[in-house]
Amino acid sequence: MYGFEALTFNIHGGYLEAIVRGYRSGLLTASDYNNLCQCETLEDIKMHLSATEYGPYLQNEPSPLYTTTIVEKCTLKLVDEYKHMLTQATEPLSTFLEYITYGHMIDNVVLIVTGTLHERDVQELLEKCHPLGMFDSIATLAVAQNMRELYRLVLVDTPLAPYFSECITSEDLDDMNIEIMRNTLYKAYLEDFYRFCQKLGGATAEIMSDILAFEADRRAVNITINSIGTELTRDDRRKLYSNFGLLYPYGHEELAVCEDIDQVRSSMEKYPPYHSIFSKLSYGESQVLDKAFYEEEVKRLCLAFEQQFHYGVFFAYMRLKEQEIRNLMWISECVAQNQKSRVHDSVVFIF
Amino acid sequence: MEYIDNLPPMDLMRSEKMTFVQLIIPVESAHRAVSYLGQLGLLQFRDLNDGRSPFQRTFVNQVKRCAEMSRKLRFFKDQIHKAGLVPSPNPASEPDIELEELEIQLAEHEHELIEMNSNSEKLMQTYNELLEFKMVLQKAGDFLVSSGNHAAAQETELSENIYTNDGYADSASLLEEEMQPVPSNQSGVRFISGIICKSKVLRFERMLFRATRGNMLFNQAPADDQIMDPASNEMVEKTVFVVFFSGEQARIKILKICESFGASCYPVPEDLTKRSQITREVLSRLSELEITLEAGLRHRDKALTSIGFHLSKWTNMVRREKAVYDSLNMLNFDVTKKCLVGEGWCPVFAKTRIQEVLQRATFDSSSQVGIIFHVMDAVESPPTYFRTNHFTNAYQEIVDAYGVAKYQEANPAVYTIITFPFLFAVMFGDWGHGICLLLGALVLIVREKKLSSQKLGSFMEMLFGGRYILLLMSLFSIYCGLIYNEFFSVPFHIFGHSAYKCRATTCSDAYSVGLVKYRDAYPFGVDPSWRGSRSELPFLNSLKMKMSILFGVVQMNLGIILSYFNARYFGNSLDIKYQFVPQMIFLNSLFGYLSLLIIIKWCTGSQADLYHVMIYMFLSPFEDLRDNQLFWGQGVLQVILLLLAVIAVPWMLFPKPFILKRLHTERFQGRTYGILGTSDMYNEEEPDSARQPHLDEFNFSEVFVHQMIHAIEFVLGAVSNTASYLRLWALSLAHSELSTVFYEKVLLLAWGYDNIVIRFIGLAVFAFATAFILLMMESLSAFLHALRLHWVEFQNKFYNGDGYKFKPFSFALFTDDDD
């Protein structure tokens, strides 16, 4: 019931919203990051993190410490929190929470398939998978030889099955095809998620459509930039853009014909929300673009917490936490490799 | 006044006098000094490095080492727990070892353990594999035998399957298959056997079916034994499977699927003799391995037991060391970097002991320079420290739960020790229930030594912590129960004969007409004959209601008087003149007068209506009291009291803020700026010191609003708080009525039947209701109401409760579960 969430939301969602807001207050703050950036060794990072919510997850780690351990443990915390929320959730929140993991699932599928293509060990690949995107029989992906088999053997049991219907071809798997598959899957996923949120209605639809539209637009820009100079035709490229978002449909027409980054830039600067991002960019830089997009995303995600009685907070929290883990990974890497001068390059402060 | 000042000091009334001290410790004796101070436990360090993050402090490396060591200790504890050993509770007394030594020892132990673990893990893995192989051999052998018998049947079935399916890949592979030299099996059917987790079987089978497009036969049988999963150390159920299929491609696919499902495949020879030979080999190797494994396990257990012997001692030691370094991190280096400077609070009485300890530390570390210990001034308010014992601690906790007392302000805990259990008992008056509570409290107190050493559940811990409260509560409820003459609501003639008798011999009219008095009053408490009679409820209600008001007025007066002692102690004459005096007048002219009327009415036995008197005292103060007059001159007195009450309100509202404002302007003579000068240099010298002066601005409107709130709260509170004390009556009534219901409507009703089953059920229900509803729920509710009366009605008259607790650096305060 639009506008009346306050009446009924707390019956099922109140407890979990309280939980997620509690989790949010455990996110690292700017002063934490400042302290972390001053660390000399990974031990210092561990010591600082032990005073935060991450403490119990890191306290039993023997030194010497590695970046991967820190990231792994931090991700473990995220996964534990997610599982806690998922087990407490009722419909439709549980479906909403499951939607959040589909993105990771797609990434994992692509990771395994690419890995097997390059003849990596399956166990090794499994360790690299994001734990949120795990599903039963994920390891069986290695058996598949082409897309059709991939679908018929494994993915038909997963929630990704409906998204796959668009890219079933009997073509062999190669890097290009896999990348196209990833983007097609992502497109279908985002559109499905968008429709689901619209169906939920209310503040959830309002906030999630904003966040998802931004996500779709960002993907469109990234696809365009990455496909410049490849053999991907304009029509194929056009097909990979999600059919919603601020850029849909006219922006997509323009992006589809872009041949270099400056054209992308000129077409994007017409959109006020993205104007500020692209105006910061000096010509030909995509590293900075990523950070600018992340910052913009974090800003939008934080705004989701300003409203009550909607599911957007769950999505926002998961995304913010992932950003936090990315930050920690960057800081730890910089510290471990003695590149402290670059430590601020890609850290996005959350609060 | 002289007399009041010369009263002997009450320890618990005011918190300990504290003093701010500075320590200058030479670096070489710093560690020893701080650990001695930790043993003494009477000094609270201030953090002088507040702005610095933990890893920028001086002793960060030592703290890290301690953290690492405690991690190792946790690892040992975990290992010991996993091995199912019980660490010996009393570690042997051994000469103390140095931290460095301990560190080396721990590292050695850890290394040894990890190596042993990895060895045994490897062995375990081989053992598991062999065990699985054995099972596969047994089960798969059965399948093969049966499949041999029905080979012909299966063959036709399989070939049908193949030909009805028109997948091109399979027909191609079938062609290949035909061209290959077929091994012993003529039909081209091969098999893979293996073992897999039971939970995965269904998905595994489905995947196989899909991958081979149904061209396979899946046989499964549950394994006999559970197999230990090396990763999680849990026993898992497994299932042996045999897949029959045809074709090389299918074989690769199936093997891949097996791998991805974590199924282990074992080759099973089809030949029966070969199979039995392998089985024999496997069995013999299994028994060998078992012996090795056992030996390894024994060795490991031995190592763990020897670690477990010292574990608690080591843990304690590491924890102490970590605490010492954490405290050292709060200290600052002085300019020369040769001394550490520390600041902190300590009680005045502890100064000499601290000095002794410091001297000992200097001596023991054979330092040339002594430790300088001197008292300084501090602007910050000192922490609050009450020296409590087993008995008073729980009552102090009750008060602290509301707020920690301001430094040296009157401590309500002193009065709470008696008033709290007493007010509880007024609501819980029943000497039968009181005896039950008393028994419980005595059990807790007698087993105090044993219980305090062990870990209790959260509920038991609460009960145990409040055992002395429970004791006094039960004693007072026995007392109140005797006054109310309640024993599970059975009347008892303890103190002689009743003064009343029934009008008729049958006593049937006691409810309707009442009783007649025929001798002197019952000597103590309520007359037992009234139970169930007409006069019972009116009498008890009137008694309890009036009693509640009397208690309330007395307790509130006590609160206001305590505010006088506070003001006097802190030399605040304004508070006495403009707060204490009008408050006293206001409360007593209204409710003190009511209490007086109640007492006079009790003494004279007058029929006056006190409601009427109190209400018309406000509505028409000059009217004649007529029948309601209790004593001569009452009308005049009422007018005077009313006038006093009306005057008292502006008295407590207006003068204080204006006088404060005048004082402030006089002090600064109209200047609005503070005094410049030395304070800046002072700050630079010791930027983190507690001695930073801060001048507070005087904001008249704020002060006035505060005073207004205070006055209004008091005036309204006087009425509502007095009414609030009526809860004593209400709860007491509820308690006695409930116990009457359970006694008469359950126990007596059941006893009326001449049937043992019904009697027994009645008794059970009665016992259950008494234990859970009356003893637990009712005592809980009475406890909460007594708590409220203390926190709200009593303490808001005088208690600030904005202090902070004294937290000395002490080893004794460490508990086992703080890591």
Image (spheres, coloured by chain):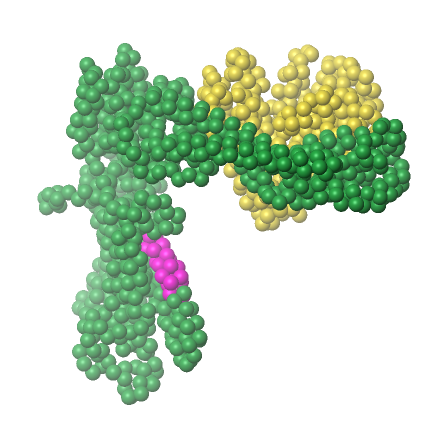
Query: Left or right: where does residue A314 sit relative to residue B722?
Result: right
Magenta stretch, main secondary structure class: helix
Q: Position of residue A126 (x, y in %)?
A: 65, 28
Question: Which span is picked out in magenta?
Answer: B769-788
| Quarter location, residue A166 | top right
* B186 up-or-down from A217: above or below: below
Q: For residue B436, what is the image quadrant?
A: bottom left
Question: From the viewer's perspective, is residue A253 above or below residue B624?
Answer: above
Q: Is residue B714 magenta?
A: no
- Which quadrant of the rendered structure holds the C terminus of chain B? top left
Q: Is residue B678 visible?
A: no
Rendering colour (chain A) = yellow
Q: Nearer the viewer, residue B758 or B143?
A: B143
Name the residue at 31% across, 57% down. Answer: B440
What residue is drawn where x is 81% and y is 45%? B150
| Residue B784 is covered by the magenta coloring | yes
Instruction: Please state if B146 lies on the left or on the right of B646 as rendered.
Output: right
